[in-house]
Image (cartoon, helix red, strand yellow):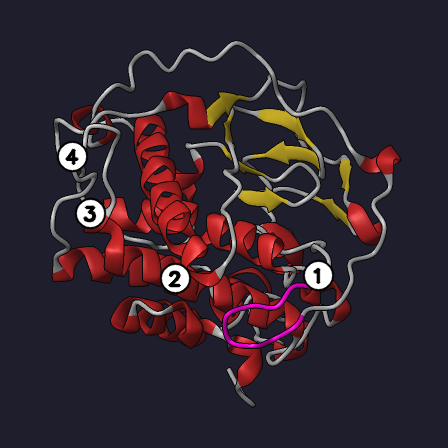
Amino acid sequence: MSFNDNVQLDTSQVESGSRGGGGFGGGRGSFPGGIQVGGGIGGLIMLVLMLIFGGGLTGGSNTQVPDGTTSGQSSPLDPGQVGAAGTQSADFDKCKTGADANKDDQCLVIATVNSVQAYWSQLLPQYGKQYPKAKTVLYSGTTQSGCGTASNQVGPFYCPLDSKVYIDASFFQELTKRFGADGGNLAKEYVVAHEYGHHIQNVLGLLNRAQQDPQGPQSGAVRVELMADCLAGTWVKHATETKDANGVSFLKPITEKDIQSALSAASAVGDDRIQEATQGRVTPENWTHGSAESRQKWFMTGFQTGDINQCNTFGVSRV
């Protein structure tokens, strides 16, 4: 989807990550619950393990969600695992309008964050929940998150320990070149909206289910990821209704080409697609994010219904 040229961007919803030295390379990043993530995007197999598109690593306290599901209590946080988020002075002066977002990926992320947060700020109060805004950290190379080292080799993710989304905008090039997404705007916007789906899960106390049942085609981890896909789809359905501080709609009308672009991204990051590319075989017992077909299916469920109650992946026997 393209942004309206005259929409005004709010850069206060993002911050710049401090540049770290080296990157992952052969090193390892520490994450809650004893999860260790190493390697790089060149190996790709690490993306299957947890963090591409932000695996849910922990969650909030018991919360009743709109469909009646009640989550479990999260495990205690370990302060020793909480790092400092990037605080490098940001230079987002180039990102002022929708026209900037249509030609620059960093500005596109900012505009998408603005639209997604406007959507959730309006919707959650209808279910008796206030929406706490979550900043996105835009960085280049590496930066420190509350969940360990953020790197383009890790991919975009949501960190529940500091309630922030981490994105290196150059990942979008990898999404196209390595994974086969079509490079359209909605393929990129889908990535951002998916991560904010994890923020919503954290607010509702659902995110910790990924830890409780971490692998397999019907696992809690997969269901958490597919729910985030569905929540992203509901934003797409209502995206043209979101407006800036001046009442200008963020996005132009959705086209069929836009939807196909989002579906190309959803398919590209299916566990089966990544496993086939990296190990030459598909092993569903190791899935953490769901098949290409399931990711497309749940995105479309959100988009076609526009109803977050239809995103209850824990309420069906098979996803």
Looking at the rendered structure, the secondary structure element under dot 2 is helix
Image-quadrant location for residue 11? top left
The crowding category of the residue bearing disc 1, from other C-alpha atoms within 10 Å (few below 14, some 14 to 19, many at least 20), is: many
Judged from the image, the secondary structure of the residue bearing numbered disc 3 is: loop
| Residue 22 visible in the shown view | yes
* Residue 14: assigned label: none
Which residue lies at the image location 46% right of the left edge and 26% below the top edge? Answer: 14
Percent coordinates x, y for residue 90 in the rendering: 47, 13
Q: Mark 3 belongs to which amino acid?
A: Met
Distance from disc 2 to disc 4, alpha carbons, whole Å, reads: 29 Å
Circle 4 Cα neighbour tier, 10 Å, few/some/many (<14 / 14–19 / ≥20): some
Nearest to the eye among marks 2 and 4: give it: 4
Instruction: Identify the amino acid type marked 1.
Output: Asn
- Depth check: give the residue in front, 35 or 307: 307
Question: Mark 4 is on which residue type?
Answer: Val
Q: Residue furthest bottom?
A: 317
Q: Disc 3 designates what residue? A: 1
The magenta stretch spans which residues? 63-70
| In the image: residue 274, left or right of residue 184 | right
Name the spot of residue 27 as percent of width and height, x first: 76, 34
Earlier sequence position, callout 2 versus callout 4? 4
Q: Residues within 10 Å of mark 3 (few under 14, many from 20)?
A: many
Name the chief secondary structure element in magenta. Answer: loop
Q: Residue under circle 1?
A: 208
